Image (tube, rainbow, N blue to C red):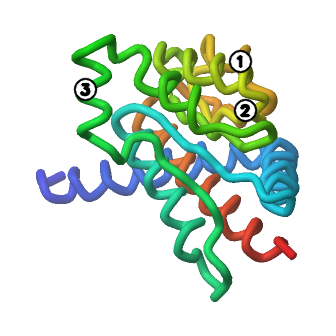
Amino acid sequence: MTYEAQLVEEIKNDFLSSSELIKQSSNLSIQIHHVIKKIISALECGNKIVLFGNGGSATDAQHIATEFLGRFKIERTSLPAISLVDNTSLITALSNDYSSDIIFSRQCSSMLSPNDIVFAISTSGNSENVRLGLIESKKQGAICIGLLGNNGGIIKDHTDLSIIVPSTDTAKIQEVHRVIYHIICEKVEKLLK
């Protein structure tokens, strides 16, 4: 087998591997349904969605907020969503003046109202700043949702609802997270009355 043919075969296997994990994750449909219902209920009551995570999960938090604020597939009014990773000046100031562990909890302490949705994303399930953000969010009366991997890690114990992708491979978890949050965005805007 030539190098080119071998590379093409490896790429094909990578797609099949991702597809298999997505297929296994279809068992998460009930959890996804519950999350959709919580988000819709909160938005109908005038609450907002607050999202955060680190690294690729920070990018996912921005992506989800953008889908809610703009639109996913249909024309509709903008939905209130805030990504806590957007203000780099604030994040770097908090990290420098205090610690990177408090970058989300500090923001949540002043930004949340009771029954807001907090959507925390962590592929490892063990991000300390995400965990502390959830602890503060609960103090503020928010409904805490985790989009996690790695069996949920320590973060699953700080959420009201968790969607846990059954993998420890960060890249694969991120691929499935994207499918999950696209489903959530699509159903929320379709079902929101």
- The answer to whether the residue labelled 1 contacts the one labelled 2, judged by CB atoms less than 8 Å apart, is yes
Q: Is residue 7 visible?
A: yes
Query: Secondary structure under badge 2?
Result: strand
State the image coordinates of residue 50 (x, y, percent, origin top left). Answer: 59, 44
Q: Nearer the viewer, residue 163 or 24?
A: 163
Residue found at the far bottom of this picture: 75
For the residue labelled by badge 3, is the local secondary structure a helix, a strand or a loop? Answer: helix
Where residue 2 appears, as percent x and y from the top left, is 13, 54
Q: Amino acid at mark 2?
A: Cys
The residue positioned 39% from the left and 32% from the top of the image is: 54
Left or right? Give the position of 178 relative to 13. Answer: right
> How far across and down, in percent of the image, does residue 120 sit?
59, 34
Callout 3 touching callout 1 (CB < 8 Å): no
Q: Can you identify the residue that label 1 sits on?
A: 158
Residue appearing at x 79%, y 47% in the figure: 35
Image point (87%, 76%), residue name:
193
Q: Nearer the viewer, residue 49 or 181?
A: 49
First of labels 3, 1 by sequence position: 3
User: Please, what is the three-letter code of the amino acid marked with disc 3?
Assistant: Ala
Q: In the rendered view, would you say 8 is above or below 85?
A: below
Q: Which of the marked residues, 2 or 3, is nearer the chain's N terminus?
A: 3
- Pointer 2 local density, CA inside 10 Å: few below 14, some 14–19, many at least 20: many
Residue 83: % across, % down: 48, 48
Among the 4 quarters of the image, the one containing residue 165: top right
In the image, which disc is placed on residue 62?
none
The tag on residue 93 is 3
User: Label 2 belongs to which residue?
Assistant: 144
Q: Is residue 185 above or below residue 53?
A: below
Q: CA distance from mark 1 to mark 2?
A: 8 Å
* Mark 3 to mark 1 CA distance (whole Å): 26 Å
